[in-house]
Amino acid sequence: MEARYLIPEWGNPKQIGLIWPEELYKNESNAARILEYYIFFIRLLISNEIPVLILTCMKDETEIRKDFNNDELVDVKYFQEVSDLWIRDFGPVFQRDEKGVPCPVKFLYEPSYHYTAEDKKWGDRNEKAGQQIVTEFLRKELKYVTVNGKEIKLDGGNLVHNGNGKAIITSRILSENELLKEEKNLKDFKKSLGISELIIIPPEPGDDTGHVDGMVRFLDEQRVLVNWYPYDYIQSDKYISYSEYLASRDYTGWLAHYLKIEKGLTVLRMPSGIPRKNIYDFENATGNYMNFLRVQDKIFLPYYGDNEECNLAKQVLLNYKAKHNLNLQVVQVKKNATPLAEYGGVLNCITLHLY
């Protein structure tokens, strides 16, 4: 595969893809609230003139269309294989070919945090779903990122980049792909994606997924947002322990310094709430604002209620926009994302840019 730059998240997608949660989460206590959130969020996207592709395992698509008044910006497709919402992780990424045409390439979705046979079965279904997105909905040839003929394992949530050769990934890329520990193989991997500088960082303490998109994001080719835990720790049954909090706070402080001093990036800090204790068997993303959706010049920012923390996150972005003359609009998704975030992800996790 020839070197081609990845398309950045501020590109102009044909659609934003989401997995419809109704059938998948019907037995969960938060099912109704998650469905309400999706309806609210999708309506917000189409009100901003952003086309949406809803993929559903429900064979009757007409009821879904009614939720959006059969708006022409909403497309709904039957999607047999999918078993969960996190389309960012198992869907393709996009490059432009030598003629500038977007082309999808895929990583193998086989996470190391799938410990049990049931986990692996769940992951296999999502891997097939990712294949189906490429071959059936995009009608493109299925191409994997390979090195020495071996498919590279990587979750989409563990890749952020600037669209011009610079990318950040956690060291999970090495532990899940032993062959990339060899310099030549890592060089081939970078070339296949058009990456000239690959910044490999440790995962945030306590994060089983090893994803990067909840702690650092590119705003443009040179500027990155890095999580910031600015508040004094509050003792509460809903928060992680003080020692765990300090570990995350110290880590993000190190990361900001490393990206600025060692890598020459312009670092801006993004407020986050004190991380919450897990409710399920994975991280609780409640209070994380970094996992926003970016579409062209718009940032769709998660919201967890009308409180000081949410207001601060929005205001900080607006301040950065003014100070750095950024071409950004900040759109706060004013529906409480907690029912979704408790399952481990927010807006970037549940969406996929389709070109």
Image (cartoon, rainbow, N blue to C red):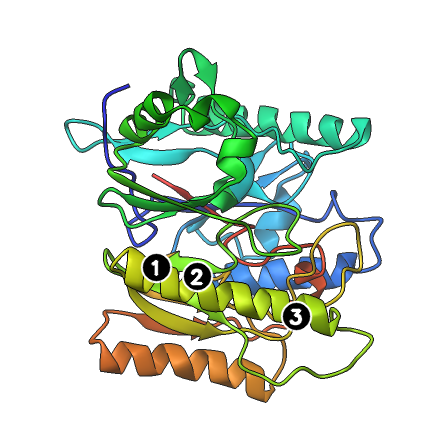
Residue farthest along the bottom direction in this orientation? 308
Seen at 44% across and 79% down, the residue is 314
Rounded to the nearest whole Å, what is the CA distance between mark 1 and mark 2?
6 Å
Q: Which residue is mark 2?
A: 255
Residue 271 is left or right of residue 10, and the answer is right
Q: List x then y, in percent, for residue 98.
A: 16, 26
336, 309: nearer the viewer:
309
Determine whether 260 is above or below 140 in the image: below
Q: Secondary structure at mark 2?
A: helix
Residue farthest along the top direction in this orientation? 149
Q: Which residue is mark 1?
A: 259
Q: List x then y, in percent, for residue 113.
A: 68, 38
Determine whether 8 is above or below 59 in the image: below
Is label 2 in contact with label 3 (beta carbons under 8 Å)? no
| Label tally | 3
Tell me where residue 60 sits by quadrant: top right
- Mark toward the start of the polypeptide (3 vs 1): 3
Q: Secondary structure at mark 1?
A: helix
Q: Secondary structure at mark 3?
A: helix
Determine whether 353 is above or below 344 in the image: above
Res 343 seen here: yes
Seen at 69% across and 66% down, the residue is 244
How crowded pointer 2 is (Cα within 10 Å; few <14, some 14-19, many 20+) is rated as: many
How crowded pointer 3 is (Cα within 10 Å; few <14, some 14-19, many 20+) is rated as: some
Q: Quadrant of the N terminus?
A: top left
> For the residue marked with disc 1, what is the amino acid?
Leu
Is label 1 in contact with label 2 (beta carbons under 8 Å)? yes
Tell me where residue 125 sits by quadrant: top right
Q: Which residue is mark 3?
A: 245
> For the residue marked with disc 2, what is the amino acid?
Leu
Rounded to the nearest whole Å, what is the CA distance between mark 2 and mark 3?
15 Å
Seen at 41% across and 28% down, the residue is 138
